[in-house]
Amino acid sequence: MALAAQSQQDGSAGSGGFLVQLPPTSPQRSSVPLVASPASAPAGVFKTVGGFTYDWTALEEAIMDDAQVENAYIIVGNATDSEYLYEFEKGSFSIDRVTPIASASKWFTGALAMRMVQAGLATLDDPMPPPLVFWTTTGTKKDVKLKHTLSMTSGFNANPLVGGCQLLPTMSLYNCAKSIHDLRYDALRPGNAPGAQFSYGPHGLQVAAAYLEAKDTSIAPGTSPARQRNIHELFAQHITTPLGMTSTALYDPAGSAPTNPWIAGGGHSTARDYAKLLRAFLGGAFIVDMDTFTQQRTAGLTRLFVPGSASTWEYALGSFVECDTPAACATSKINSSPGAFGWTGWIDRQTGYYALIATEISSGGDAKGVELEQEMQGLIEDAIESRVPAS
């Protein structure tokens, strides 16, 4: 679920080791390659899309030279052209392979919340009660709002290694949120009020999902007795159905839908589906207020647990704001949500593209995916900037 995370409390790296929490292993699915990867990059890789010709030679060479990501499906696209600007299958990884995406799932919850805000069903400044009727009315915990739970600043993410009810699929999402509320708020650290600390972990998003499920006022059609939609129905209503994401769920779609899905790390998707989400983000019509959705919300906060591969990045609503230095995050237009198995998608609103590394790496995938992403970014920018009108 989580990226490799390091403790940065009091400015130190703790023991210097890395903390990693991974989803339960899932059976390896067989896939048939759609495109055979050549033994070495061809002399030139060109593609004409939308009246322009792009030279992807340098990008493909870098992808093939990367020894850490052996099997992946790579996609680069923009918001205006339905055809991908670039796609490449390295090794054997089908564009339609259903894959556990670990922490890349976090963007799902942020997007769902923003879509429900657009629909008038919630606001980012909503307090947890009254939909979550168990919520306390005393202490700093009473001040937790939806925006805090989505931005890792709620006070519930003390440690990404802490287990808990998010790993109990047969529990109700509501009762899981109550368990987190009752047991997981870190009252031992001074100043642990919502909006005061950035700590990367699973609990805030689990609470956010429970709140959205309880807040929804729509009624599931055809049910008797009538009931509110559950989190899976809301996700389909607001995200997957509008985008035609037919192979994406908050759980492994090969099984049954859990009543308490692992919100921060249990999602599954395909490269084709996830690219639709990234393209929608970039387009600006699916989520109208992209500035609110993508802006940093952790600048200047105490950083307790931060992914090692994102030590200088800030956090938005379900995604990181990428930057080389914390100060640069104020103007950065690059957001991403990498996962522990290397699945890494990102949008660059300044250059005007989205990209995806769809992969499943059993060990150290989070660092390997991000390293390849960082190498790809400059090469993609170069290819876009040097495109030429098609003759």
Image: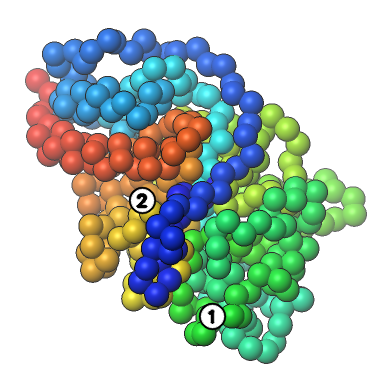
Horizontal side, residue 98 vs residue 163: left or right: left
Q: Residue at x 47, y 20 (%)?
A: 94
Tag 1: residue type?
Arg
Quarter of the image for residue 85 reads: top left
Colour scheme shown: rainbow
Residue 236 image point, x, y percent: 63, 44
* First in sequence: mark 1 vs mark 2: 1
Q: Secondary structure at mark 1?
A: loop
Tag 2: residue type?
Ser
Instruction: State the mark number for residue 189.
Output: 1
What residue is pinned by disc 2? 309
Instruction: Name the residue nearer the viewer: 78 or 43.
Output: 43
Residue 180 image point, x, y percent: 69, 67
Horizontal side, residue 309 vs residue 96: left or right: left
Q: Residue at x 51, y 49 (%)?
A: 20
Residue 363 image point, x, y percent: 48, 35
Instruction: Name the residue nearer the viewer: 274 or 91.
Output: 91
